[in-house]
Image (spheres, rainbow, N blue to C red):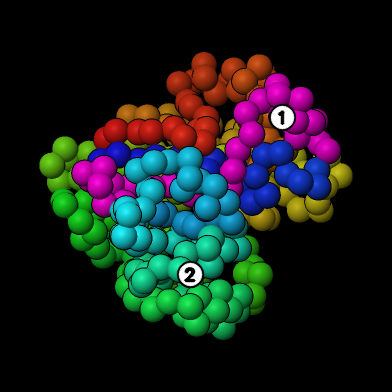
Amino acid sequence: MLLRVLGSAAGGGSPQWNCGCPVCAAVRSRAGLARTQSSVAISADSRRWFLINASPDLRTQIEAFPSLHPHDDRTTPLEAVLVTDAELDHTLGLLLLREARALRLYATPTVRKTLSDGSGILRTLERYCPVEWRAVDPGADLALADGLSCRAFNVPTTKRDRFGAGVDHGRVVGYRLTDERSKGTLVYLPGAQSLTPALRGEIEGCACLLIDGTCWRDDELIRLGLAGKTSREMGHLPIDGPDGSLAQLPSMGAGRTIYVHMNNTNPILLEDAPERHTLEERGMEVAMDGLEIQV
């Protein structure tokens, strides 16, 4: 199984267009790598590809990855899109796929309802191309292609949806991906408010974990005067702190742990930041656009 990180930043990317925080300023001065918004592509054979989430930067991400380029007759290696939730930074890219002859979309019923009745993204997309919806049932295995399968799992959150409170079941999911040939397992979890026992069970022993790295500190945005909510209140477990992800993850035995979905304010985006060095000393990695992982 091959995974390509198409975009490694949270909503808004890095640097964010309207932000002059110290990290964004450093990235603009080329002290750090620019990053597009969160999305990955996976394949069992490097020929048929599946996206997990479709960011607003999807066109640029596809052009940067030749394996996703179309053939002469407009056929495309892109088989389908799986989504973890209905957030705009994970679904706006669906509209960029409207020229497709048809599009297969994997989503929970809750997410599908939000995309249809809340944001309207799915209803708009259906005006341009046929959309085949495949229901994602957390806990059930889904066969994708060529020995590649996945299982979605619920990610509990108290965060209120942008389009209403909704229900917790299926509102946010992560994916555990398995390649039957290599027996490798990979967990993609770009949003997690806490590492509950159930989530720990999904993570433990996987060959590779890509996990929520939105904020370094819980009060990161408050300190910078950019928001009035903590990281947890926005649905994201911070990295630092006695009960942050960095303190908890080593006990779960993942073969490789990589932070994704970093907010533009997170100092781990800068290679020379002390926070980045702290991660690396613990054996953790920070994703960049274009990173490829073989499992």
Residue at image position (66%, 70%) is 162
Q: Is residue 18 magenta?
A: no
Task: Compare residues 129 and 276 and report the one nearer the observer.
Answer: 129
Residue 65 picture location, percent across and down = 42, 41
Task: Compare residues 199 and 84 and report the one nearer the observer.
Answer: 84
Q: Which residue is mark 2?
A: 98
On screen, residue 39 above or below 275: below
Earlier in the chain: of badge 2 and badge 1, it is 1
Magenta residue span:
20-49
Residue 217 picture location, percent across and down = 69, 37
Q: Amino acid at mark 1?
A: Val
Residue at image position (46%, 48%) is 62
Name the image quarter holding the C terminus.
Answer: top left
Q: Which residue is mark 1?
A: 27
Residue 251 visible at all: no
Q: Is residue 241 left or right of residue 53?
A: right
Residue 104 picture location, percent across and down = 34, 69
Q: Is residue 45 magenta?
A: yes
> Regarding mark 1 in the picture, which secondary structure is present there?
helix
| Residue sticking out furthest to the left | 181
Q: Amino acid at mark 2?
A: Arg
Q: Marks 2 and 1, Cα distance to the nearest angstrom?
A: 32 Å
Residue 290's mark?
none
On screen, residue 112 above or below 153: below
